[in-house]
Amino acid sequence: MEWLTGPFEVTFVQRALFGGLLVSAITALAGTWVVLRGMAFLGDAMSHGLLPGVAVAALLGGNLLVGAAASAVVMAAGVSVLGRTPRLSQDTSIGLLFVGMLSLGVIIVSRSQSFAVDLTGFLFGDVLAVGEGDLVALAVALGVALAVAVLGHRAFVALAFDERKAHTLGLRPRWAHALLLGLLTLAIVASFHIVGTLLVLGLLIAPPASVLPWARSVPAVMAGAAALGASATFLGLLLSWHLDTAAGATIAAVAVAQFFLSRTAADVLRRLNAPVAPVAPVAPTPAPAPSMPASQPTHPTP
């Protein structure tokens, strides 16, 4: 038991665990819609689009979270505006913004010689450096994310499964999409300093995707994703302590491993439960009719 509980007797590991649990809950709320709507590329672009704001905030000696939030708002607004451009697909607009924001961030970073540590933390996070202030901020972010998820649930469901029906029901899909972008932005901004922008996508996508084959409702996917994210946080911190590996990367790796285990188990179960098609009985081949003996030629009697 000492191997299992020993690491969590250390204060900074305890704070890392609590921070990871809060991040798991936040990313479960946003990540469920990311998976259901196929927005993984958008999540990746949003996470990398934080770099210019973080770089400017670091250069000016400001709060990195504020810089990240400002950059994320610009990215989300750009996706919304360009998404309405005729003959320009959403993937194209996201890709252009992704490259543009990332390039701008790299240019800003290249102008400074003191970004080595900050850039590493931006990319890979530092879950073991979570403080009490971070926990409070994460708790507030979780409360806001939960409120948005509850209030926008009906509109999000209609948007995810039938956008035309959302129009018919008067749910304003454009506003719902913007609100969903806000929820995704909140999850990424709140999580990037914990697991980093390169790894936040692991907690954002892997747990909901792992639960999807087993759940029958959106709330069940969210609850299962939060539980899997929490277990990935615990196992990741435990393994990183004993194996001396990067904590954030180990957490994300465990989350991805859970996805592959879940999909494999679901595939095996589906094959075992697949109905076996009945074999049609083979009709017996009818025996050939007996051939009549050839008639003998008759000769006239003399």
Image (cartoon, grey):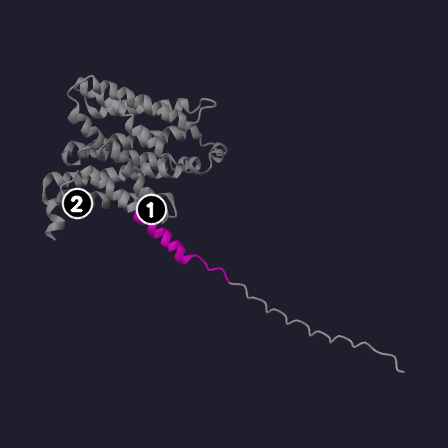
Please tell me which of labels 1 and 2 falls first in the chain.
Answer: 1
Prevailing SS of the magenta stretch: helix
Q: Quadrant of the image for the C terminus?
A: bottom right
Q: Which mark is residue 211?
A: 1
Q: What residue is shown at x 16% (from left), y 31% (from top)?
A: 133
Residue 291 pos. (x, y %): 70, 73
Q: Which mark is residue 189?
A: none
Verify whether residue 78 appears in magenta.
no
Would you identify the image quadrant in which residue 97 lies? top left
Nearer-the-camera pick, 296 or 113: 296
Would you identify the image quadrant in which residue 53 lies? top left
Please tell me how many numbered marks the rendered image carries.
2
Q: CA distance from mark 1 to mark 2?
A: 23 Å
Nearer-the-camera pick, 188 or 255: 255
State whether residue 241 is above or below residue 266: above
Helix, strand or loop at label 1? It is helix
Would you identify the image quadrant in which residue 285 lies? bottom right
Image: magenta residue range: 260-278
Q: Nearer the viewer, mark 1 or mark 2?
A: 2
Residue where numbered disc 2 is placed = 239
Q: What residue is shown at x 41% (from left), y 22% (from top)?
A: 82
Helix, strand or loop at label 2? It is helix
Look at label 1 and name its amino acid: Val
